[in-house]
Image (cartoon, grey):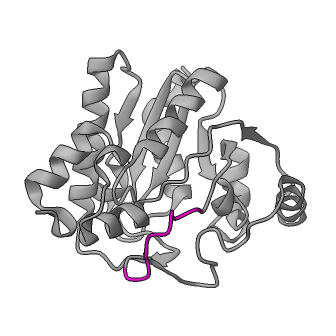
Amino acid sequence: MRIALLGGTFNPLHIGHCMLADSVLCDLNYDKILFVPANIPPHKMMNETVSAEERFLMVEAFCKSAENYGTKRFFAEDCEMKRGGVSYTCDTLQYIIEKYGDKIDGKPALIMGQETAAQFYKWKNADKIAESADLIIARRNSDFNGIDTSGFTNVPEDGYSKDFHNEFSLKDFERQFNSHLSCRYTMLENPLLPISSTEIRARISQGKSWRYLVPDAVYNYIAEHGLWGYR
């Protein structure tokens, strides 16, 4: 069984995340995608009041609903929430390897966006992660569609840059990535969807259109619980 991990805050999970996971399934022939919501992300200070449990429940609701559309290969993994504290990928990866054991065909894969991968060398035990997992890097886009997101952005910490701080060509990205780490990776030819959780939070709060930027299950959860001031 080929397993890939897609981690993040999922604050909230949106159709860009869903499309990315589906691209890995279809284009790279993986069997299972584990969505892993972070408990406390190590590289940014979140300015939101939505709890880790609520973020996980939105992801879980989506994964269960996907079964109705014939996709039984998306799963919500709550190990970081249960572990508590700051969520480090190296710990999660080791947990997944031990949990699935010899059921995993080869190495588990780790999916990350291009802007995250550019700073991957700063991660805790990055070398060990690169040895233990196959890296899949997805193309990203930073267009916020003219929405004011200034009050909804997360603050980077520990020397990390803001998301999309480094916008450069693929060749420039490869040069920067390879200058810090010597490891192989797969660049995913995923569709570029200019969507971000930051923009969605801002749209909800400002009463602007956002309904179809998230899966039905996530929309229903946000509406039912009145997250981000939804009325």
Could you tell me which residue is drawn at 18 percent across and 63 percent down? 227
Picture coordinates of residue 133 (x, y %)?
66, 42
Q: Is residue 73 left or right of residue 118?
A: left
Could you tell me which residue is drawn at 48 percent across and 45 percent down? 16
Could you tell me which residue is drawn at 22 percent across and 68 percent down? 228
Whether residue 159 is in magenta: the answer is no
**Above/below status of 156 relative to 128:** below
Identity of the residue furthest to the top in this view? 70
Q: Judge by depth and name the residue closer to the eye, 223 or 78.
A: 223
Q: Judge by depth and name the residue closer to the eye, 212 or 30.
A: 212
Q: Judge by depth and name the residue closer to the eye, 15 or 121.
A: 15
Q: Is residue 75 left or right of residue 120?
A: left
Q: Judge by depth and name the residue closer to the eye, 102 or 171.
A: 171
Q: Is residue 58 left or right of residue 96?
A: left
Q: Main secondary structure of the magenta part?
A: loop
Figure quadrant of residue 190: top right
Picture coordinates of residue 28 (x, y %)?
66, 25
- Magenta stretch: give its range: 143-151
**Above/below status of 115 relative to 18:** below
Whether residue 150 is in magenta: the answer is yes
**Above/below status of 22 relative to 210:** above
| Quadrant placement of the N terminus | top right
Figure quadrant of residue 160: bottom right
Picture coordinates of residue 109 (x, y %)?
61, 38
Picture coordinates of residue 121 (x, y %)?
73, 66
| Quadrant placement of the C terminus | bottom left
Give the total number of marks visible in the rendering.
Answer: 0
